[in-house]
Amino acid sequence: MAGQDRVQETGKGSGKSGQLDFPRPLTTVDVVIFTILDDRLQVLLVQRPAGEEEPYPQALALPGGFVDVAKDRDLAACAARKLKEKTGVTSPYLEQLGSWGSAVRDPRGWSATHAYFALIPADASALTSDARWHPIVGGRAKEKLAFDHGDILASAIQRLRNKVEYTSLPAFLMPAEFTLPDLQRVYEIVLDRPLEKSAFRTRILSADMIEPVAKMRRGPNRPAQLYRLAKGREPVYFVRTFNPPE
Amino acid sequence: MAGQDRVQETGKGSGKSGQLDFPRPLTTVDVVIFTILDDRLQVLLVQRPAGEEEPYPQALALPGGFVDVAKDRDLAACAARKLKEKTGVTSPYLEQLGSWGSAVRDPRGWSATHAYFALIPADASALTSDARWHPIVGGRAKEKLAFDHGDILASAIQRLRNKVEYTSLPAFLMPAEFTLPDLQRVYEIVLDRPLEKSAFRTRILSADMIEPVAKMRRGPNRPAQLYRLAKGREPVYFVRTFNPPE
DNA sequence: ACAATAGTGTCTATGAGACAATATGGT
DNA sequence: ACCATATTGTCTCATAGACACTATTGT
């Protein structure tokens, strides 16, 4: 109970002499994976196992699990592994979201999870059988999630919406080739409000984040220029947000 | 080594039946505490103990340490406790910065730290004897820090600078009463570049983040209006950054 | 009166919002 | 020709940057 206090003074020293024999929290990593599917923002959820001693049996949860100290070099590698295992996708946009830790979030004991969030194009993924896309409705999933995964998801959605106001993040949700109206639609889906066509194009094109390919998308109307992501993978930051309406 | 893989499938389930007997990473919390002192941005560092089996004996480190599963309700409470223990400050600005975890960052084994960053007014703190302020020079501390604390500090500085561009965060570095030129100076110290007086005042005043008190600061020149923080504690977000020079 | 800093005003440039106008394919 | 959507242009407004100007104290 007390008596382990000393180990937390000063840096992460053990105070005395390498005494590391005190209870350790459980350490997990969870990944909030977003995509755009059927003109909606969707999140990847898995169903928890049914065992009797399982917490939240059969409930929906974010993909994730315990850190494997033998297998995972670091937290990001652990997150990337889980992303890969569930979707087959290797190198999309993967960013740390934050961590959640408390005595009560997992009935098995004090636990802390390191949450990541990822953006992938729906067409690039090959889901495992236990994983499914669930649309975000009204800022969250329709179903109740296990643990505090509902909170984590809400936080991820907020972070995504926030960043979409002033970054090129939605570009990572696009397939390899896309048109400007496609991209604008994705911005609008995430922000849940319409954007001005003209201002949108000016901003995106002047950001040098995409480059035209020598092809047009044809349809029953005027063809649209196709673009692909430019440069490396880093998102672009704008100096202004899209002006909120209010 | 392997064999524990199964526990990480699907949510944070243990796969089989509550098998929790596998190696757990060490779990720590570290806090990057900033203040403005002597017209410079400074960070609070503590000296690690000298014991033989200590990692990084006597090196400088961020204040922090192991999570105490008996004492700490959650991660934020743990961070607040460490902040309080070292500075005596209770409720300043405290935000989660991120987490760092890997097999090699601590010689004692796989470890993950949850890093927080805090902003406090220098005049409100009463430091413990092992803690001292260290100026940030050229974007980092002059000394080499223990563990990966140099990386964590660099990340905190970057986050702070970034947010100062479009938020009212520096207000949390101010004493109870301050003038607009005082506040501007703090913005300039953190950003390390001069800001336009007129644009600065317009932005700050129209944000409703501070309110005048019925006092003036007197000096050998024209007196300046004193202000204090308005509303609750939440920072204000501007829709535009201060336009970078270049 | 003068120094020094606080606070305001003016002018210009940039980019968003609104929305109109034009372009180009399929049918 | 007509429809539907892509793409461009025009006009107005808000706000930052530059910088000049005014205000108010102590000395």
Image (cartoon, coloured by chain):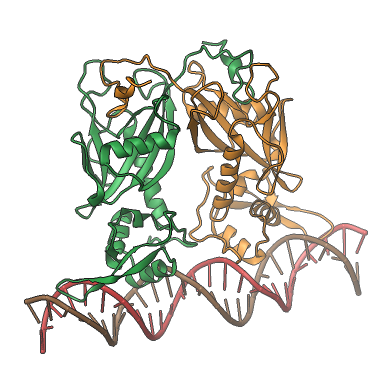
Chain colours: A green, B orange, C brown, D red
On screen, A139 above or below D5?
A: above
Is residue A70 in sight in this rendering? yes
Q: Residue at x 65, y 51 (%)?
A: B190
**On-image quarter of the C terminus of chain B:** bottom right
Q: Residue at x 22, y 55 (%)?
A: A39
State the residue in front, C23 or B4.
B4
- The image quadrant that residue A144 belongs to is top left
Image x and y of residue D15, in percent: 53, 66
- The image quadrant that residue A112 belongs to is top left
Image x and y of residue A43, in percent: 27, 43
Q: Is residue B3 left or right of residue B217?
A: left
Image x and y of residue C7, in percent: 68, 64
**On-image quarter of the N terminus of chain B:** top left
Image x and y of residue A225, in percent: 28, 72
- The image quadrant that residue A99 belongs to is top left
State the residue in front, D12 or A136.
A136
Q: Is residue B140 left or right of residue A105?
A: right
Q: Residue at x 66, y 27 (%)?
A: B86
State the residue in front, A219 or B5.
B5
| Number of on-image labels | 0
On screen, B122 above or below A216?
A: above
Q: Is residue B131 left or right of residue A25?
A: right
On screen, A38 above or below B52?
A: below
Is residue A41 in sight in this rendering? no
